[in-house]
Image (cartoon, rainbow, N blue to C red):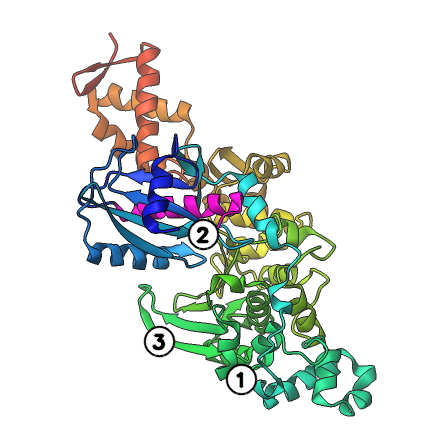
Amino acid sequence: MTTEEILDNLLNLTTESEVVEFKEANTRYDKDKLGKYFSALANEANLKGIQDAWLVMGVKDDKSIVGTSIRDQEVNEYKLEMARETSPRSTFINVHTVIKDGKRILMFQIPAAPLGQPISWKGHYYGRDGESLGALNQIEYETIRAQITHQDWSAKIIERANIDDLSKDAINFARTQYKEKNSKLKSEIDSWSDEVFLDKAKITIKGKITNTAILLLGKPESEHFINPATARITWILKDKDNFEKDYEHFFNPFILSVGEVSSKIRNLKYRYIKSGTLFPEEVDQYDPYIIREALHNCIAHQDYSLGGKIIVVENEDGILSFTNSGHFIPNSVEEVVTSESPEPKYRNTFLVGAMVNLNMIDTIGSGIKRMYNIQRKKFFPLPDYDLSNNRVKVAIAGKVVDINYARKVAEMPSLSLEDIMLLDKVAKQKNLSDSEAQVLKSKKLIEGRKPNYHISSNVASVTGEKASYMKQRGINDDYCQKMIIDYLKKFQEGTKKDFDKLLLDKLPDVLDEKQKKNKVKNNLQALRRSGEIEPLGNIWKLSK
C-alpha cells in the first residue's frame, strides 16, 4: 500500500483512534507535545498488536486539509529529540511527505513499543483513552511489561559468538571464584576444560555463548554482540560544587572491571571518637563490601534492553552513588531490607545465577540489608534509594552527619533496623507515609504534624539532643500569641514585619521561612478573631 493510500484510509476514519492523531501544525509543532504523543501512540500500537501508529501534520481534527510548512530541518530535529528523550530509545520509522489537494502533509510513522517495554518520554509513560492524551494507566503498563516475563535477556544465546570472544584472564579469575564457592570440588574443577567449566558454572548453555557470558567474561571488543545493550560502567568524580573533575569508562569483562572501578574510588580514612573512649575510631569512608555489593547489584539488575550504562559518581563532599537502568522489581527497598527470604523473581535470572556461582552475589536476600547494617554500625546515614525515572540510584554517605545523635540513637536497644530506617528519613527531612508516621508516633519517636515531623522528646532525652529537640519543636501557638500581646502592651503597635523579627527564629527549624511567616500570620488572625487585637491598615494594635 502506498503512502497516499494509507493517508486516504486514515482520512476515512470516522474518528481519531488511539493509534492515529491529526494535527494542524501550520508552521511548527512543540517538541515536548510531540514526544508525549510519540510515547502514547507507540504504547497503544503495542497494546493493539499492530506494527505502527501515525501522527499526521497538516490536517485538522475534522479531517480538513490545511497543509504544513514545517521544514525538513525541523523534522530532523524532531527525530533526534525523540531518540534522545525516549526510553528505550526510539524514533520515527519514517516521515513521509504527501501532497494532497495541492497542500503538503507530513505523516510521522511511529513504531509500536517493543514487547515488554513501554515507551517513556522524559521518564513518563503516556497512553490514549479515545482521543484524549494522558498517563498510561497501570493496567496497560503491566500488560506491556508482562509480554516478556517468560523471556530472560541474559540467557539469550549468541549464535555468532564462540569461546574465543571471551577473555582468558576473566575465565581464569572466574575459575578461582567458582572454587571459592565450591571448595569441595577444587581438584575436580582443575581438570575441567574451559568449555566444561563455563557450562558447569551456568555461564554458557551447552557450549553456546550467552549474553551473560559476554557481560561477565567477554573481551571488550565483543560488546557488539549484545547491541543495543552496552557493557559499560562510567566512574565520575565531582567536586563540592557538583562540577565534573574526572571520569573514566570501564568495559566488559565485568568480573574484572568491578575491581578496576573499585580501585578508582578514593576510599579515604574517616576518624571520629566513639562513646566511652578518648581514642579515635578509624574506618573506611566506604566499606569495601558496600562498594562491591552496589556494583554487583547494578550489573545483576540492570535492564540491558534500555541501552543504558551503569554510572558511579564520587562526590568530594562524601557521597558515593551507583545508578543502573530499569525499574525496581521488588515492591520497595524497605520490603527487601525487612524480608527474611530472597526476592522471588529477577529481571536477569540466568545472569543472577551465574553471578551466584562465581561468588559475586548471594540469593538469600541479605545483601542490601547488610549494607544498611554496616552503615548503621558506623553511625553513618543509611543508604538512600531513588527509584524515579525508570532507574535505581543508591547514594552512600561516607561520613557522620551528627555523631552524638547517630551514635546514641543507633545504640538504643529498643530500636529495630526498621525504626532506624524511618528515623533516618526524618533526619533527611524526607516525607513519611501516614502508616510510617503512625509507626513512629505509636512508639513515641517523633512529634509534629505532617509533613513537618521531628524527633520526640523521648528520643531527645536518650540521645542527649534536648537542645536540638527544642529547636525542632519550637514554641507553640499559645506562647507565640502571648509574645505578640506582650509586644503590643509594651510598644502599643506593631507591623507584620515586626512580629516576623520577633518570632521567626523561635519557630520550629523543620519549617521553612515561608511556613514560619504563615504561622505568624495565622496567629495574628487567631488573635483578631478572638477580639484581642485589631488591624488598622498595616498596623496591629490591642483591641480597646
Which mark is first along the chain, 2 or 1? 1
Q: Residue at x 17, y 44 (%)?
A: 27
Q: Amino acid at mark 2?
A: Asn
N-terminal-most mark, 1 or 3: 1
Name the residue nearer the viewer: 379 or 167. Answer: 167
- Which residue position is annotated with label 3? 246
Q: Say which quadrant the C terminus sits in.
A: top left
- Image: 10 above or below 529: below
Q: Nearer the viewer, mark 1 or mark 3?
A: 1
Say which quarter of the image contains residue 102: top left
- Name the amino acid, label 3: Asp
Callout in the foreground (2, 3): 2
The crowding category of the residue bearing disc 2, from other C-alpha atoms within 10 Å (few below 14, some 14 to 19, many at least 20), is some
The span shown in magenta is: 30-51
**Mark-to-mark CA distance, 1 and 2:** 31 Å
Q: Residue 340: where, in percent of width, then height?
A: 74, 54
Using residue 343 as the reference point, say whether residue 329 is left or right of it.
Answer: left
